[in-house]
Amino acid sequence: MKTEAAVLVDIGKPLEIRELTIPDLKPGQVLVDVAYSGVCHSQLLEIDGKRGADRFLPHVLGHEGSGVVVAVGVGVEKVRGGDHVVLSWIKGTGRDEPSTRYESSSQRINSGAISTFMRRTVSCENRVTPIPADIPLRDASLLGCAIPTGAGIVINTIQARAGQSIAVFGAGGIGLSAILAAAYVGATPIIAIDVYDHKLELAKRMGATHVINAAQKDPHGEIVEITTGLGVDFAIECAGHRKTMESAYESTRYNGGLCILAGNLAHQERISIDPMDLIKGRRIAGTWGGETQPDRDIPVYIAAYRTGRFPMDRMITSIYSLSSINNAFNDLRSGNVGRALVDMSL
């Protein structure tokens, strides 16, 4: 059995479209026809070599998607053939099979437990979550990373409540998901910060009450003014830049303000904070996928989506074919997309 995949062969070079041979399923593995895959900044860091040395080259990429189960390996009980599923890098329940190796005409191609930049993929039981068949697979693909991480930060990590103030730095897929969840729980004000006006307009559609173009205005000064001198209860950094991480931290209020770092810096890059701010009660923390438990949380997001109060589909701005996936990453580099998807039917 064959599949077509986008393969990272060399750091800093475009992905190559290769035909791969699918191996026999191991116990605990699941074969999925991928419908859609998200295109994420963390994958861009791998392509550009900003994650450090890559000892797994050549390998396939992609950690967020949706599709339909084709077959399951021995011991899989969570899903069966024909089930619609979300594919996610975040571990859920079920068996864990951490790696797969495919064969191409010239060399062996490595994969982790999940790779979604391919038409048919081998994953494992704890990386798939079954969903109702009537949920559009296009929209469901967001439940693999963007929504669980961004919305998960708001709902699980900080447990935001109505009336609390939130600033979100970076209006990409994770940031837009955080804004969506903040609006869903009734946070106010919800302040979106980015350097692109078109992304800030999208942030408004997702529920932002205020927007700041950081290329034109000082975010810290603007946030202090919006919050009448206090700073926000929560700042969520999703842009993955040193300056925005430091600015996000400084935008939180004393005596309890919390900054969550979700963005990824380049390998070995560091941020600097004033420890006196910690003594004054500012806090800073990281997040692991919004502290998401896929089997618990994905059904909650689907239920909210059905009501119309959680319009996650609004963040999808661009659709690409697998053969044009490098265009997707070029557009991501230049800030031209909110959440981009690869449609495997194209």
Image (cartoon, helix red, strand yellow):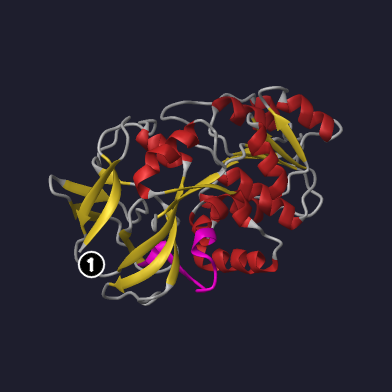
Type of amino acid under label 1 = Lys
Between 253 and 337, the residue placed more toward the observer is 337
- Is residue 298 visible in the rendered image? The answer is yes
Q: Which residue: 61% across, 63% down? A: 301
- Does the magenta segment cover residue 16? no
Instruction: Indicate left or right for 306 with 44 as reference.
Output: right
Image quarter in which the C terminus is found: bottom left
Q: Position of residue 246 (x, y in %)?
A: 62, 27
Mark 1 surroundings within 10 Å by alpha-carbon count, few (fewer than 14), some (14 through 19), many (20 or more): some
Residue 132 belongs to the span the image colors magenta: yes
Q: Nearer the viewer, residue 232 or 63?
A: 63
Residue carrying label 1: 26
Where disc 1 sits, the SS reads: loop
- Quarter location, residue 231: top right
Farthest-out residue, left: 106
Query: What is the tally of numbered marks visible in this picture?
Result: 1
Q: Residue 26's spot in the image, x, y percent?
A: 23, 67
As displayed, is residue 276 above or below residue 144?
Answer: above
Q: Where residue 229 sits: x, y (%)?
A: 84, 30
State the extent of the magenta-drawn residues as a range: 125-139
Residue 16 on image: x %, y %: 27, 41
Q: Is residue 254 left or right of residue 100?
A: right
Look at the image and tell me in which quarter the N terminus lies: bottom left
